[in-house]
Amino acid sequence: MSFQVFGLPVSRGVAIGRAVLVSSSRVDVDHYFVAETQVESEIARLRDSRDDVAAELSGLQRDLPADAPSELSALLDVHLMLLHDEVLISATKQWINERHYNAEWALSAQLEVLARQFDEMEDDYLRERKADVEQVVERMLRAMSRGASSGCAEGDGSIRAAAAGAEPLVLVANDIAPADMLHFKRSVFTGFVTDVGGKTSHTAIVARSLDIPAVVGAREGSRVIRQDDLVVIDGDAGLVIVNPSDIVLEEYRFRQRQSELEREKLTRLRHTPAVTMDGERIELLANIELPTDAKAAVAAGAAGVGLFRTEFLFMNRAGELPTEDEQFEAYRAVVVAMNGAPVTIRTVDIGADKPLERMSAGELRHEHGLNPALGLRAVRWSLSEPAMFRQQLRAILRASAFGKVRLLIPMLTHVSEATQVLEALERARQQLIDAGKPFSAVDIGAMVEVPAAALVLPSLLRMFDFVSIGTNDLIQYTLALDRGDESVAHLYDPWHPAILKLVEGVISQARAAGKGVSVCGEMAGDPAFTEVLIAMGLRSFSMHPSQIASIKQNVLRTDSRRLAALVCATFKADDIWGGCEALRNALAHPATSSP
Ligand code: PEP
Ligand code: MG
């Protein structure tokens, strides 16, 4: 049966593929294809994991103390029975045999099928057995990760080759954590759908950086879409079409080809300078999450890196933080890859929807707090862990010996925080001098992400060399809504006059003070805002590498003077709502409002 699921469009384009349902807790399970010749050994891994777990459970049962409650022994019996149940094992083998899924993927795919069957059971007792199956599968997955690998590690070329001939796959999950999106970078999926999330949640941001079609906030998506359904993800409209008719499918295949052609056309702009019709040079920089993303930035013709979100280096590390040398190597790799172009490295922005997860007791922890977005996040966390912060500052400074590095501090709200940051930087510099480690001069920038920073901007401008406007958080904190919460996504409005007024105010004050100013939030990569930001005086934009070409195309079509007077009048007028409305109208109708 064909039906549609509506969500939020977060990453453009069309993906068509078979649905792979993955529960949120298993998004980090390896997903890759094995070659025909490896099917047998993959099945052997599955069998071995079953035998290991059977031995483990039998051992537990044998060692039960005499006075242990009888339920415990009964529970172990149930787990042993499930382990040997052919519904689990033979169906899992089928996923490996027929689809060439690796054993972990096959097992979790079968678990999803079983979990749904349990959910649909009328009988409470039977429904609750789902937890037992999950525990057994969890044990098998752990056993597999302890055991020898299949020799076909994730990201391996042979996997890609095997995947090339296979049907495309799209991932459907309740949620994907930003940390798990890093797995996605190396996975076989061509698109994804999640039930939760907002347009500027970090999961959505990473999807855009991967340039893969995605829909978030699809609410019931993972409940109504079934394993193996044929799914069309329309990333432009925020629409998911499940089991489309032939005619709809054909239409979307056509659109897919069209958008590929469009992208190819845009890549030809790579070497074209970003200059407006009236000769204003616009700097188009790249936002990156990992050192390997620098390649995409160079390929897209970025003039440098405007935002390196270093927190992704701190994730998926089972509780260990990267050492100073590891960080230094990562930062240096980007600086070297950018070959003389500036690299803006932001200090770690942990917290809100980017927690440091899987920490074990006694290690440096990041607690969630009552309201993570308003809690110990970004520079607040850095200042609460001074040794960790100085270590990062030293690593960044050391990378400056290899190219042009700029340092960026996230989420400043208080001038006293800025003072502490500058003191920490001074200490880090002194420590490097004492250790005889070289570094060069770096410009220091403040992110303007909370209204407080925009309102005390002159004080910050006196302390910093440049500012970068983080519109994702600026919208969240100004409009008092969680950027990751799909239930308030309709209120997340970059066109709200309060946002435009704050952005315009920051740009004009920074320019008047002779300081650099850029926008590195999602607004910079949204073609709808290119002209208005240029009219406000912005000359530096930072965005995902995949967005650079289309923004450049807009720059080339823009006359920076066309809306300058209107912008100026809008933010001075009493009726700012009406003024912003007029501005949007003028943007939508270029011919009627030309000077
Ligand atoms: C922002 O808030 O706009 C920003 C660029 O930072 P992040 O999206 O990483 O919070
Ligand atoms: Mg931010």
Image (spheres, rainbow, N blue to C red):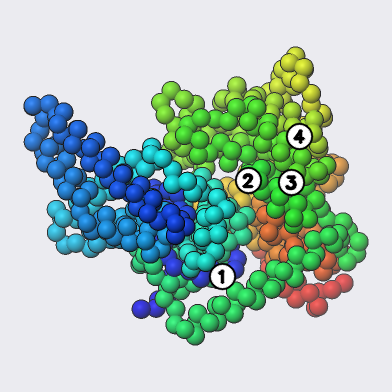
Structural distance between the alpha carbons of marks 1 and 4: 40 Å
Please give the label number shown on residue 305. Answer: 3
On-image quarter of the N terminus: bottom left
Mark 4 surroundings: few (<14), some (14-19) or many (≥20) residues within 10 A: many
Point out the quarter of the image occupied by ligand 2: top right
Given the current orientation, which residue lies at the most extreme bottom position?
247
Query: If you read the primary sequence from the N terminus, does the residue marked by circle 1 or circle 4 appear first?
Result: 1
What residue appears at the point 24 percent right and 62 percent down from the top-left corner?
A: 117
Structural distance between the alpha carbons of marks 4 and 2: 20 Å
What residue appears at the point 58 percent right and 30 percent down from the top-left corner?
A: 322
Q: Amino acid at mark 4?
A: Ile
Q: Comparing marks 4 and 2, which lies closer to the viewer?
A: 2
Q: Amino acid at mark 2?
A: Glu
Question: Quick check: can you spot residue 384?
Answer: yes
Q: Nearer the viewer, residue 317 or 533?
A: 317
Query: If you read the primary sequence from the N terminus, does the residue marked by circle 2 or circle 1 appear first?
Result: 1
Q: Amino acid at mark 1?
A: Val
Q: Is the residue 319 above or below the residue 570 in the image?
A: above
Across and down, in percent, residue 49 comes to 31, 44
Reading the image, the residue beneath label 1 is: 14
Query: If you read the primary sequence from the N terminus, does the residue marked by circle 3 or circle 4 appear first?
Result: 3
Q: Nearer the viewer, residue 212 or 122?
A: 212
Q: Amino acid at mark 3?
A: Val
Query: If you read the primary sequence from the N terminus, does the residue marked by circle 4 or circle 2 appear first?
Result: 2
Q: Is the residue 26 above or below the residue 432 in the image?
A: below
Structural distance between the alpha carbons of marks 3 and 4: 14 Å
